[in-house]
Amino acid sequence: MTLPPETIIAPRKVTHYLLRLLDKDDKSRFLALGGYTSNDPAQLSRDVREQLLPLYAELVGSTEYGTKYRITGTLRGPNGRELRVVSYWMSVEATGLTKFLTLYPDKL
């Protein structure tokens, strides 16, 4: 299945989690390999929406909050480098909305 095109990608998730250097579970260094920086967080949001969201979403389970999905794919960064990623999404039971949760490097 594919997730709805109106799926929410919270700007704060991108600016304060994915593109911010963190002591634990940092993703900013990996994303920087593709040219993603905190100077243009909208680029990462656009690329996730345009390059990952249309791909097949695999059901991975349910929680008390909703149904989780995984999308594995490639992000072509602004510098042209391709990054293999695994992303996680949730259809929230209480609201009926689907939202982006996180992404990780794909460790084939």
Image (spheres, rainbow, N blue to C red):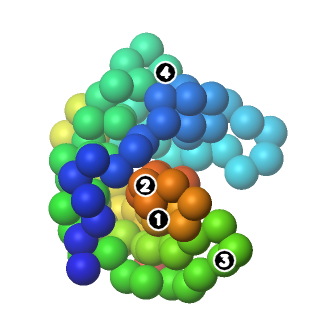
Q: Classify the position of the C terminus by image quarter.
A: bottom left
Q: Quadrant of residue 45?
A: top left
Q: Badge 2 is on which residue?
A: 97
Q: Classify the position of the N terminus by image quarter.
A: bottom left
Q: Earlier in the sequence, mark 1 or mark 2?
A: 1
The reply to whether the C-beta atoms of the residues labelled 1 and 3 are less than 8 Å apart is: no
User: How far is mark 1 from mark 2, CA to CA?
Assistant: 6 Å
Q: Earlier in the sequence, mark 2 or mark 3?
A: 3
Q: Earlier in the sequence, mark 3 or mark 4?
A: 4
User: How far is mark 1 from mark 4, CA to CA?
Assistant: 27 Å
Q: Is residue 94 left or right of residue 56?
A: right
Residue in the picture at 35% in, 35% down: 44
| Residue 105 tag number | none
Query: Which residue type carries mark 3?
Result: Thr
The reply to whether the C-beta atoms of the residues labelled 1 and 2 are less than 8 Å apart is: yes
Q: Nearer the viewer, mark 3 or mark 4?
A: 3
Q: Secondary structure at mark 3?
A: loop
Q: Badge 4 is on which residue?
A: 38
The reply to whether the C-beta atoms of the residues labelled 2 and 4 are less than 8 Å apart is: no
Picture coordinates of residue 18 (x, y %)? 55, 39
Q: Badge 1 is on which residue?
A: 91
Q: Nearer the viewer, residue 97 or 8?
A: 97
Query: Which residue type carries mark 2?
Result: Leu
